[in-house]
Image (cartoon, rainbow, N blue to C red):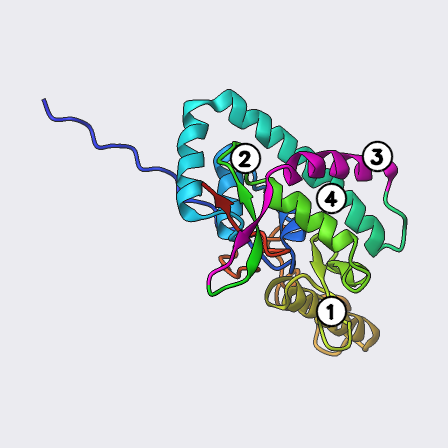
Amino acid sequence: MPQPPATLAAPEYVFDLDGGRACLDFTNTLSTSGEHLKSYADLVAFAAQSQLIEAEDAAWLRAEGQRDPATAEGVLVRAKRLRESIRTIFSSLAAGKAPPEHDLAVLNLDLAASLSHARVLPAAGGGYRWGWTGRNFDAPVWPISRSAADLLTSDQERPLVRECGAGDCQWLFLDTSKNRSRQWCSMQSCGNREKARRHYQRLRAHRDDAPATTGKTRGEVSGPAAAGGGGGRGAGRGRRRRAGPAGGASATAG
Protein backbone atom coordinates (compact mmCIF):
# COMPACT_ATOMS: atom_id res chain seq x y z
CA MET A 1 0.00 0.00 0.00
CA PRO A 2 1.47 3.38 -0.91
CA GLN A 3 2.43 5.55 2.03
CA PRO A 4 0.93 9.05 2.41
CA PRO A 5 3.36 11.88 1.70
CA ALA A 6 5.32 13.13 4.71
CA THR A 7 4.03 16.30 6.31
CA LEU A 8 6.28 19.20 5.48
CA ALA A 9 7.73 21.03 8.46
CA ALA A 10 6.69 24.63 8.93
CA PRO A 11 9.31 27.05 7.61
CA GLU A 12 11.57 28.58 10.23
CA TYR A 13 10.53 32.07 11.26
CA VAL A 14 12.98 34.74 10.06
CA PHE A 15 13.64 37.22 12.85
CA ASP A 16 14.13 40.95 12.31
CA LEU A 17 17.50 41.85 13.78
CA ASP A 18 17.45 45.65 13.76
CA GLY A 19 18.23 46.30 17.42
CA GLY A 20 21.99 46.59 17.05
CA ARG A 21 22.70 44.30 20.02
CA ALA A 22 21.63 40.72 20.60
CA CYS A 23 19.79 41.51 23.83
CA LEU A 24 17.70 44.21 22.12
CA ASP A 25 16.91 41.93 19.19
CA PHE A 26 15.81 39.37 21.76
CA THR A 27 13.36 41.77 23.42
CA ASN A 28 11.89 42.45 19.98
CA THR A 29 10.83 38.82 19.55
CA LEU A 30 7.65 39.93 21.32
CA SER A 31 5.90 42.75 19.49
CA THR A 32 2.49 44.20 18.71
CA SER A 33 2.30 41.76 15.81
CA GLY A 34 2.56 38.79 18.16
CA GLU A 35 4.78 36.33 19.99
CA HIS A 36 7.66 34.95 17.91
CA LEU A 37 9.08 32.59 20.53
CA LYS A 38 6.30 30.04 20.42
CA SER A 39 8.52 27.03 21.00
CA TYR A 40 12.00 25.99 22.08
CA ALA A 41 12.82 25.52 18.38
CA ASP A 42 12.05 29.23 17.87
CA LEU A 43 14.50 30.13 20.63
CA VAL A 44 17.19 28.02 18.97
CA ALA A 45 16.36 29.60 15.60
CA PHE A 46 16.78 33.10 17.06
CA ALA A 47 20.17 32.22 18.52
CA ALA A 48 21.32 30.64 15.26
CA GLN A 49 20.12 33.51 13.07
CA SER A 50 21.79 35.99 15.45
CA GLN A 51 25.02 33.96 15.15
CA LEU A 52 25.06 33.36 18.88
CA ILE A 53 25.44 29.59 18.39
CA GLU A 54 26.96 27.51 15.62
CA ALA A 55 24.78 25.74 13.06
CA GLU A 56 25.80 22.27 14.24
CA ASP A 57 24.97 23.19 17.84
CA ALA A 58 21.58 24.51 16.72
CA ALA A 59 20.81 21.23 14.94
CA TRP A 60 21.79 19.26 18.04
CA LEU A 61 19.66 21.45 20.32
CA ARG A 62 16.61 21.12 18.06
CA ALA A 63 16.91 17.34 18.13
CA GLU A 64 17.38 17.28 21.91
CA GLY A 65 14.40 19.58 22.33
CA GLN A 66 12.22 17.08 20.50
CA ARG A 67 13.64 14.24 22.57
CA ASP A 68 13.09 16.00 25.92
CA PRO A 69 10.26 18.54 25.48
CA ALA A 70 9.79 19.10 29.22
CA THR A 71 13.33 20.37 29.73
CA ALA A 72 13.11 22.41 26.53
CA GLU A 73 9.89 24.06 27.72
CA GLY A 74 11.53 24.96 31.01
CA VAL A 75 14.33 26.76 29.18
CA LEU A 76 11.78 28.61 27.04
CA VAL A 77 10.00 29.83 30.19
CA ARG A 78 13.34 31.02 31.60
CA ALA A 79 14.17 32.80 28.34
CA LYS A 80 10.85 34.64 28.28
CA ARG A 81 11.27 35.72 31.90
CA LEU A 82 14.72 37.06 31.05
CA ARG A 83 13.31 38.79 27.96
CA GLU A 84 10.67 40.59 30.02
CA SER A 85 13.27 41.88 32.48
CA ILE A 86 15.70 42.98 29.76
CA ARG A 87 12.91 44.83 28.01
CA THR A 88 11.81 46.56 31.24
CA ILE A 89 15.40 47.54 32.05
CA PHE A 90 16.17 49.13 28.69
CA SER A 91 12.75 50.65 28.04
CA SER A 92 13.08 52.34 31.44
CA LEU A 93 16.51 53.69 30.51
CA ALA A 94 15.22 54.87 27.13
CA ALA A 95 12.53 56.83 28.99
CA GLY A 96 15.09 58.39 31.35
CA LYS A 97 14.02 56.27 34.33
CA ALA A 98 15.91 53.94 36.64
CA PRO A 99 15.32 50.22 35.96
CA PRO A 100 13.38 48.32 38.64
CA GLU A 101 15.54 46.43 41.12
CA HIS A 102 13.51 43.26 40.54
CA ASP A 103 14.42 43.14 36.86
CA LEU A 104 18.09 43.79 37.58
CA ALA A 105 17.94 40.86 40.01
CA VAL A 106 16.46 38.59 37.33
CA LEU A 107 19.25 39.58 34.92
CA ASN A 108 21.95 39.03 37.55
CA LEU A 109 20.55 35.61 38.46
CA ASP A 110 20.54 34.52 34.84
CA LEU A 111 23.96 36.07 34.24
CA ALA A 112 25.48 34.08 37.10
CA ALA A 113 24.15 30.85 35.61
CA SER A 114 25.30 31.76 32.11
CA LEU A 115 28.82 32.99 32.87
CA SER A 116 29.73 29.69 34.50
CA HIS A 117 29.89 28.40 30.90
CA ALA A 118 31.98 31.31 29.56
CA ARG A 119 35.53 30.57 28.46
CA VAL A 120 38.47 32.37 26.86
CA LEU A 121 39.21 30.45 23.66
CA PRO A 122 41.85 30.74 20.93
CA ALA A 123 40.67 32.87 18.03
CA ALA A 124 41.15 32.10 14.36
CA GLY A 125 44.27 33.85 13.09
CA GLY A 126 45.75 34.24 16.54
CA GLY A 127 44.75 35.89 19.76
CA TYR A 128 41.84 34.94 21.99
CA ARG A 129 38.11 35.47 22.19
CA TRP A 130 35.20 34.99 24.53
CA GLY A 131 33.28 31.80 23.91
CA TRP A 132 31.14 29.16 25.58
CA THR A 133 31.59 25.53 26.44
CA GLY A 134 28.96 22.84 26.68
CA ARG A 135 25.88 21.79 24.72
CA ASN A 136 23.29 22.48 27.37
CA PHE A 137 19.62 23.14 26.66
CA ASP A 138 20.03 26.71 27.91
CA ALA A 139 23.01 27.49 25.63
CA PRO A 140 20.93 29.91 23.49
CA VAL A 141 20.32 32.07 26.58
CA TRP A 142 23.95 32.42 27.70
CA PRO A 143 25.11 35.05 25.19
CA ILE A 144 21.85 36.98 25.54
CA SER A 145 22.29 37.65 29.25
CA ARG A 146 25.92 38.59 28.68
CA SER A 147 24.92 40.96 25.86
CA ALA A 148 22.49 42.70 28.22
CA ALA A 149 25.15 43.02 30.92
CA ASP A 150 27.70 44.39 28.44
CA LEU A 151 25.24 47.00 27.15
CA LEU A 152 24.05 47.97 30.61
CA THR A 153 27.60 48.51 31.89
CA SER A 154 28.77 50.47 28.83
CA ASP A 155 28.76 54.21 29.57
CA GLN A 156 29.14 54.86 25.84
CA GLU A 157 26.35 52.64 24.52
CA ARG A 158 23.79 52.59 27.35
CA PRO A 159 22.59 56.19 26.65
CA LEU A 160 22.03 55.26 22.98
CA VAL A 161 19.19 52.81 23.66
CA ARG A 162 15.95 54.06 22.12
CA GLU A 163 12.35 52.88 21.82
CA CYS A 164 10.74 53.09 18.38
CA GLY A 165 8.74 56.28 17.90
CA ALA A 166 5.97 54.61 15.86
CA GLY A 167 2.65 54.56 17.66
CA ASP A 168 2.13 50.82 17.19
CA CYS A 169 5.70 49.66 17.85
CA GLN A 170 7.68 49.23 21.05
CA TRP A 171 10.86 47.78 19.64
CA LEU A 172 14.17 48.77 21.20
CA PHE A 173 17.30 49.66 19.25
CA LEU A 174 20.75 51.20 19.62
CA ASP A 175 20.92 54.62 17.99
CA THR A 176 24.29 54.75 16.23
CA SER A 177 23.25 57.42 13.73
CA LYS A 178 25.73 60.27 13.21
CA ASN A 179 23.67 62.92 15.01
CA ARG A 180 21.87 60.50 17.36
CA SER A 181 18.48 61.41 15.87
CA ARG A 182 17.16 58.01 14.81
CA GLN A 183 13.47 57.75 15.67
CA TRP A 184 12.41 54.35 14.35
CA CYS A 185 13.59 50.79 14.75
CA SER A 186 13.73 50.52 10.95
CA MET A 187 13.38 53.18 8.30
CA GLN A 188 12.18 50.55 5.82
CA SER A 189 9.16 49.63 7.94
CA CYS A 190 8.13 51.88 10.80
CA GLY A 191 9.96 54.93 9.45
CA ASN A 192 8.35 54.94 6.02
CA ARG A 193 4.96 54.03 7.46
CA GLU A 194 5.06 56.81 10.06
CA LYS A 195 6.19 59.39 7.50
CA ALA A 196 3.35 58.36 5.19
CA ARG A 197 0.85 58.56 8.03
CA ARG A 198 2.01 62.04 9.09
CA HIS A 199 1.97 63.26 5.49
CA TYR A 200 -1.60 62.00 5.09
CA GLN A 201 -2.65 63.73 8.31
CA ARG A 202 -1.17 67.03 7.07
CA LEU A 203 -3.05 66.71 3.77
CA ARG A 204 -6.26 65.90 5.59
CA ALA A 205 -5.89 68.89 7.90
CA HIS A 206 -5.23 71.14 4.89
CA ARG A 207 -8.32 69.84 3.09
CA ASP A 208 -10.46 70.22 6.20
CA ASP A 209 -9.41 73.88 6.44
CA ALA A 210 -9.97 74.63 2.73
CA PRO A 211 -13.41 75.74 1.36
CA ALA A 212 -15.48 72.97 -0.20
CA THR A 213 -15.48 73.67 -3.98
CA THR A 214 -15.66 70.23 -5.55
CA GLY A 215 -18.98 68.98 -4.24
CA LYS A 216 -17.31 66.85 -1.59
CA THR A 217 -17.95 67.62 2.02
CA ARG A 218 -15.02 68.96 3.94
CA GLY A 219 -12.99 66.15 5.47
CA GLU A 220 -13.98 63.71 2.69
CA VAL A 221 -10.72 62.62 1.07
CA SER A 222 -9.75 60.14 -1.56
CA GLY A 223 -7.02 57.60 -1.13
CA PRO A 224 -6.36 55.07 1.61
CA ALA A 225 -8.18 55.38 4.87
CA ALA A 226 -4.93 54.99 6.76
CA ALA A 227 -1.64 55.49 5.03
CA GLY A 228 0.89 52.80 5.64
CA GLY A 229 -1.51 50.60 7.56
CA GLY A 230 -1.35 46.89 7.82
CA GLY A 231 -1.55 45.76 11.42
CA GLY A 232 1.19 46.06 13.99
CA ARG A 233 4.97 46.00 13.89
CA GLY A 234 6.33 43.26 11.68
CA ALA A 235 3.14 42.48 9.76
CA GLY A 236 3.65 41.46 6.14
CA ARG A 237 7.41 41.97 6.11
CA GLY A 238 10.17 39.64 5.08
CA ARG A 239 13.34 41.52 5.83
CA ARG A 240 16.32 39.39 6.73
CA ARG A 241 18.82 41.80 8.21
CA ARG A 242 21.17 40.42 10.81
CA ALA A 243 22.98 42.02 13.69
CA GLY A 244 26.34 40.65 14.69
CA PRO A 245 26.88 38.91 18.06
CA ALA A 246 27.47 41.04 21.12
CA GLY A 247 30.57 40.95 23.25
CA GLY A 248 32.43 38.53 20.98
CA ALA A 249 30.58 35.52 22.40
CA SER A 250 29.11 34.04 19.27
CA ALA A 251 29.12 30.29 19.56
CA THR A 252 28.96 27.31 21.83
CA ALA A 253 31.96 25.05 21.89
CA GLY A 254 31.50 21.36 21.91
10 Å neighbourhood of mark 2: few (<14), some, or many (≥20)? few
Q: Residue 193's image quarter?
A: bottom right
User: Residue 167 or 57: which is nearer the viewer?
Assistant: 57
The residue tagged 1 is 182
Instruction: Name the kind of residue labelled 2 in the image.
Output: Lys
**Residue 102 is covered by the magenta coloring:** yes
**Pointers 3 and 2 in contact (CB under 8 A)?**
no
10 Å neighbourhood of mark 3: few (<14), some, or many (≥20)? few
The residue tagged 4 is 86
Tag of residue 38 = 2
Q: Residue at x 39, y 44 (%)?
A: 56
**Pointers 4 and 1 in contact (CB under 8 A)?**
no
Q: Can you name the residue that lies furthest to the right here? A: 97
Magenta part of the chain = 100-124
Judged left or right of residue 79, residue 252 is: left
Work out how far the residue at label 2 is from the one at label 1, CA to CA, in angstroms. 31 Å
Instruction: Name the kind of residue labelled 3 in the image.
Output: His
Q: Earlier in the sequence, mark 3 or mark 2?
A: 2
Task: For mark 4, give the secondary structure.
Answer: helix
The residue tagged 3 is 102
Work out how far the residue at label 3 is from the one at label 4, CA to CA, in angstroms. 11 Å
Q: Position of residue 107 (x, y in %)?
A: 75, 39
Task: For mark 1, give the secondary structure.
Answer: loop
Instruction: Name the kind of residue labelled 1 in the image.
Output: Arg
Q: Is residue 103 visible?
A: yes
Work out how far the residue at label 3 is from the one at label 2, CA to CA, in angstroms. 25 Å
